[in-house]
Amino acid sequence: MLLFLSVPQPRPPGVRTRAGAARVARWRRQLRRLRGLLRGLRGRPGTGGRRRGRMALCGQAAGAASLPSELIVHIFSFLPAPDRLRASASCSHWRECLFYPALWPQLRICLRVSPAEQPRLEFLMRKCGWFVRELRVEFAAENYLSGGGGPGDGGGADAGTGGEEVEALQLSSRWLEVLRTYLELVLCVLVSIRNNRNLQKFSLFGDISVLQQQGSLSNTYLSKVDPDGKKIKQIQQLFEEILSNSRQLKWLSCGFMLEIVTPTSLSSLSNSIANTMEHLSLLDNNIPGNSTLITAVELERFVNLRSLALDFCDFTAEMARVLTDSNHVPLQRLSLLVHNVSVMHKSLDNMPNDEHWKALSRKSTSLRVYIMAFDIKSEDMLKILKPSIPLERIHFDSYVTCVSGAIVDLISRQYDKFLTHFILMNDVIDTSGFPDLSDNRNEDPLVLLAWKCTKLSLLAIHGYTVWAHNLIAIARLRGSDLKVLEVTEESIDFDQGELADQDVDPVHNLIEQVSLGLGQPWHAVMDIESLSVFTEPNRHFYREMQTFSEDV
């Protein structure tokens, strides 16, 4: 057998083939375009206004419009999301590239409940809603109950019955507007993702606590905005449709959303999705009567759950038993909301006892619990705080019922091995008479808390009297391990002896001693509005719960 091999003759040096010459010419043209683009980006000195106009990024002279789409997508992948949105207004070619799915794996939106937000939300959700993998939306309702002197707040009405009637009418119109806008924004979000099968993390937060400050006020105005309930039914059906269409959902979180989750919503999830769900958060204290958003029977499907957030009254002893079953993976994060509305309408008789908590801790040695209590009486808190709860974080928020020193003492004794975050908030109008936890006690409960809880890293206090010498003691006890110490200025008080000493400025001495104890500069919180932990407790809890649950 003969093999005939064709051996090419060597080309003389410097001679190129026709294909090679064309390739080199194409490379040179692309290189010239890139150089022109870079000159336009650098804004080289000495170029006149006419030349800069010709070198605009979208101009043909710079060659930006003729760059490969893959290159544009790669360049813009280094920009943060707000800059990408601004750049999308440059030209249609850039807009097409900037909403490439790879650039938007996650979308986190915080919206004011305002009509001005609707067109922007519709544009963004129309572009990204069908492919985004992680969607987190927060609806921030403005405080329409606060008379801020804005337009239409009734500030110029005459005193007396006539002025009150005018103010009530203006308040009514604002309630109707905020509820109407809220429903439209929720519909916009849900409609855009109804067919998204790539969704892996879905989180909704509705800061509508302002709508609940006067009991049934939200239901009264809701009946005026949606008299036949069509929009509410549409929202609930869309939410269930999203759950039924999901194929990759691992994270589902819904907190304080008005009329969106029902006791039957989770039944829309297929067994395969429920079996692979890793985080579930259903927080809503508006459910009437004894209804719950999830039952122990429904929870049996969520065998892979690693973090869970529920209303405390919904977390029953039977649920604790389900989570300790051998077919469930160990639960690592548990967030519980204790709200006075739920406690009034639901019973605490079905809550887990100490043996259930011991079983949960044996099942998962890494289990940590986060509790937030809204206006809970001391006798109820004594029932709730079982010794075997692995409590890592606790947040008290009060409007009527204040936390007692006995509760703080109990926490410091029972949870000294776990507690890292302690927040004490009392939202009172009269700042002249803050409750004193150390009244009639030999030792201040907050000082004992700092002494016994050796892992304490965050302490925030507002609306309770904190004596200056006790604050210095807390700083010295915890030292640099106390990463955050937030105490409002009006909460700090001084002994008469400190105020009588003319040689020492008590405020300056406090700042100096606390800073020295913490090993870092410190000052009291002068503006309470600057910290969401004090002004927006619902939002702060929800965000902290998200971070707490992700830290697995």
Image: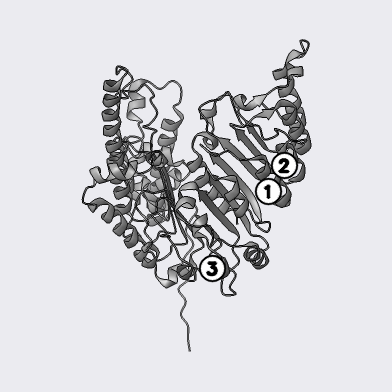
Please give left or right for residue 117 compared with residue 317 in the image: left
Instruction: Name which quarter of the figure residue 357 lies in.
Output: bottom right
Please give left or right for residue 122 compared with residue 509 in the image: left
Under circle 2, the secondary element is helix
Give me the disc on residue 318: 3
| Residue 466 in the image, given as x and y percentages of width and height | 67, 30
Which residue is denoted by mark 1 in the rendering? 419
| In this view, the mark in front (1 or 3) | 3
Crowd rating for badge 1 (residues with CA inside 10 Å; few <14, some 14–19, many 20+): many
Depicted 525 relative to depicted 186: above or below: above
The mark that comes first in sequence, 1 or 3, is: 3
Quarter of the C terminus within the rendering: bottom right
Instruction: Name which quarter of the figure residue 327 lies in.
Output: bottom right
Q: CA distance from mark 2 to mark 3?
A: 33 Å
Depicted 448 relative to depicted 5: above or below: above
Residue found 33% across the figure and 41% down from its top: 217
Callout 3 amino acid = Glu
Residue found 74% across the figure and 31% down from its top: 470
Give me the disc on residue 449: 2
Q: Is residue 92 visible?
A: no
Q: CA distance from mark 1 to mark 3?
A: 26 Å
> Is the C-beta separation of discs 2 and 1 under 8 Å?
yes
